[in-house]
Image (cartoon, rainbow, N blue to C red):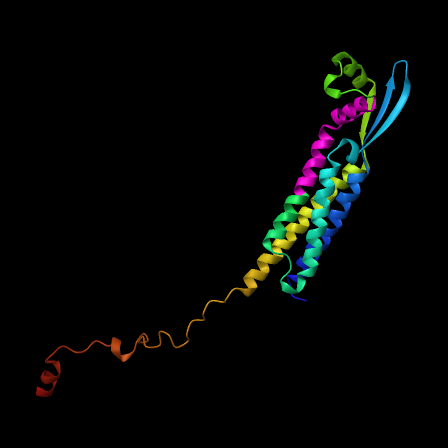
Amino acid sequence: MEPNDSASTSGTAAILAGGVLIMLGSTLTWARLAMNMPGSGAKSETLSGMNGGDGKMTLALGAIAIAVAIASMLLKGKGGLGVGLAVVSIAAGGFAAILGVMFAIDARTHALDYAIAQAGQKPAEYPGPARTILDQATAVTHGWGLYLVILGGVVVAIGGILAAVDLRARLLADAPADAPVDAEEGSDASPVGSDDDVDEPPAGAETTADAG
């Protein structure tokens, strides 16, 4: 196995696993409501990603991640993921995680809107004082489905990064190496202390010596 094969395999596995988590979490509970309205007693509601959140969008993003992982498996003998698919997986995972985090931050508003809609009324037209009473009488908690979507999105993004690292390593490995320096190059240069460096005697010096 080549050194970068481990990154390629890990990246593909992460993208596939993360895509499954996103799709599974999209259909599970995103928020739970426990209401104790005066005169109506206690009541609970369960909000899933499909009926009150962005579950349909995250479901599609999970499917895209799985498709990218399958494409990576099919292209394994041809170099694995290309830069385009790596970018798609990073974007899909990151977007899914962002959608999950945004819902988690504003889960109470989504939950109250869902409860109002379940009562047969439009959230935008619901009276302010009545909404305030509903808000005070409602406890909202996050569901496991929401956590799975966020976790899956992060895992898919990490898998895309690993795939991009593997792609870069492959490109560097396939790049032509620089031409080696010729060992004989520069051999014509005279070594230090050679005859060429010896100062020649001034003209007439040899004649003077002979005359003596």
Provide the residue span drawn in magenta: 94-119
Q: Is residue 174 above or below residue 26?
A: below
Say left or right for 75 vs 146: left
Q: Residue 195 or 159: which is nearer the viewer?
A: 159
Identify the residue at horizontal 72%, vertical 40% (top origin). Answer: 58
Decide whether residue 124 is among the magenta residues: no
Q: Residue 73 or 166: which is nearer the viewer?
A: 73
* Residue 206: % across, % down: 13, 83
Decide whether residue 116 is among the magenta residues: yes
* Residue 185: % across, % down: 37, 74
Q: Please identify the quarter of the rendering in which residue 103 is found.
A: top right
Q: Is residue 160 above or below residue 54?
A: below
Q: Please identify the quarter of the rendering in which residue 37 is found.
A: top right
Say left or right for 133 vs 194: right
Say left or right for 186 vs 16: left
* Residue 137: % across, % down: 83, 18
Prevailing secondary structure of the magenta residues:
helix
